[in-house]
């Protein structure tokens, strides 16, 4: 099968090598600033292909191909124009507009985020990466810290599980009453967003995984509090509000590609292989 990999970070580069080892013909577009694996061909413009692999997420903040290792901006519709009619399009967080454009061309779209094995593995890598980043930034051992995790999705659950092995004081904040009750039954103290200000002041680190704002007032945290943002844009912590509160916010989006690109690429490869086997 001829596969065109477009954009992305180190995960895309490693994925190209894995698919090449599977026996596919692999081309890479908008990865011209990366060192590609042996046998993988770089192309300066999209070519016809049986399958097109887009990154996670597929689009950047401007609606263009997410291509941090590419030197030219590119609309995803242009890539679709060059792909075969009936081609398989695989990517992460593919917008409704791109899905509609692919359907108009007779192409089939598959989203990584609809693959449970991928989303769980990706969340686990993100959680582990967040723990690593927190350890790097903290001036105290995690066992001596009070840590607040905001959000009870896949990443939030796995992050609390990993942190609880290292820190006896890990708390959940969620707007969801059932989530707080379940977390409490699992041994994690839980807080509503409107908890007393003195409790908020006690935390040494706050890690947000919620996609929307949950924390009502960032000024409740101490100046020394570490803030980490894991949620996709726009996220749950406003950078301007954090700056006004005198807090240092670190945004850690696309963390799997930075923290553990090999493991992240393996998760992508597994999902791609399953999708291609099923079409």
Image (cartoon, rainbow, N blue to C red):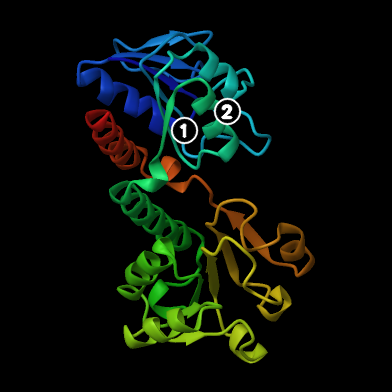
Residue 163, x across and y down, in percent: 37, 70
Q: Is residue 29 left or right of residue 101?
A: left
Residue 194, x across and y down, in percent: 64, 86
Q: Is residue 194 above or below residue 260?
A: below
Q: Is residue 246 left or right of residue 128?
A: right
Q: Secondary structure at mark 1?
A: loop
Q: Secondary structure at mark 2?
A: loop
Q: Count all numbered tags in the image, as a single digit.
A: 2
Task: Name the residue located 43 percent from the left edge and 13 percent from the top edge.
Answer: 84
Q: Nearer the viewer, residue 84 or 93?
A: 84
For the residues marked 2 and 1, what is the alpha-carbon distance in whole angstroms? 8 Å
Task: Name the residue located 62 percent from the left edge and 23 percent from the top edge.
Answer: 75
Of marks 2 and 1, which one's residue comes earlier in the chain? 1
Q: Which residue is mark 1?
A: 55
Q: Which residue is mark 2?
A: 65
Is any part of residue 66 visible from this angle?
Answer: no
Q: Is residue 152 left or right of residue 185?
A: right
Task: Name the residue located 64 percent from the left edge and 91 percent from the top edge.
Answer: 196
Q: Is residue 171 above or below residue 100?
A: below
**Which quadrant would residue 88 be assigned to in this image?**
top left
Q: Nearer the viewer, residue 25 or 35?
A: 25
Question: Which quadrant, please, contains the C terminus?
Answer: top left
Residue 21, x across and y down, in percent: 21, 20
Q: Nearer the viewer, residue 8 or 220?
A: 8
Is any part of residue 16 visible from this angle?
Answer: yes
Question: Which quadrant, please, contains the N terminus?
Answer: top left
Q: How busy is the neighbourhood of tag 1: few (under 14 within 10 Å), some, or many (20 plus)?
A: many
**Which quadrant would residue 216 be assigned to in this image?**
bottom right
Q: How busy is the neighbourhood of tag 2: few (under 14 within 10 Å), some, or many (20 plus)?
A: many
Q: Nearer the viewer, residue 87 or 248?
A: 87
- Whether residues under marks 2 and 1 lie with C-beta atoms below 8 angstroms apart, the answer is yes
């Amino acid at each position: 099968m001829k596969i065109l990999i477009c954009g992305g970070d180190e995960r895309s580069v490693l994925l190209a090598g894995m698919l090449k080892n599977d026996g596919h013909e692999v081309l890479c577009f908008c990865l011209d600033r990366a060192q590609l694996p042996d046998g993988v061909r770089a192309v300066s413009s999209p070519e016809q292909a049986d399958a097109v692999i887009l990154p996670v997420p597929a689009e950047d903040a401007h609606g263009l191909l997410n291509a941090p290792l590419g030197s030219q901006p590119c609309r995803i519709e242009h890539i679709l124009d060059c792909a075969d009619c009936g081609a398989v399009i695989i990517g992460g967080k593919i917008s409704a507009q791109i899905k509609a454009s692919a359907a108009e061309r007779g192409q089939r779209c598959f989203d990584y985020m609809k693959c449970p094995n991928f989303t769980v593995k990706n969340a686990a890598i993100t959680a582990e990466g967040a723990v690593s980043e927190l350890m790097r930034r903290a001036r105290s051992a995690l066992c001596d810290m009070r840590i607040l995790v905001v959000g009870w999705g896949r990443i939030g659950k796995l992050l609390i599980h990993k942190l609880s092995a290292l820190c006896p004081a890990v708390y959940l904040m969620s707007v969801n009453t059932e989530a707080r009750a379940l977390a409490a039954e699992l041994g994690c103290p839980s807080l509503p967003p409107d908890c007393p200000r003195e409790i908020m002041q006690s935390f040494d680190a706050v890690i947000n995984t919620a996609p929307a704002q949950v924390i009502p007032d960032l000024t409740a945290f101490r100046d020394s509090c570490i803030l980490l943002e894991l949620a996709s844009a726009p996220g749950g912590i406003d950078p301007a509000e954090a700056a006004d509160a005198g807090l240092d916010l670190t945004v850690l989006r696309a963390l799997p590609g930075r923290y553990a690109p090999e493991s992240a690429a393996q998760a992508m490869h597994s999902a791609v292989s399953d999708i291609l086997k099923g079409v």
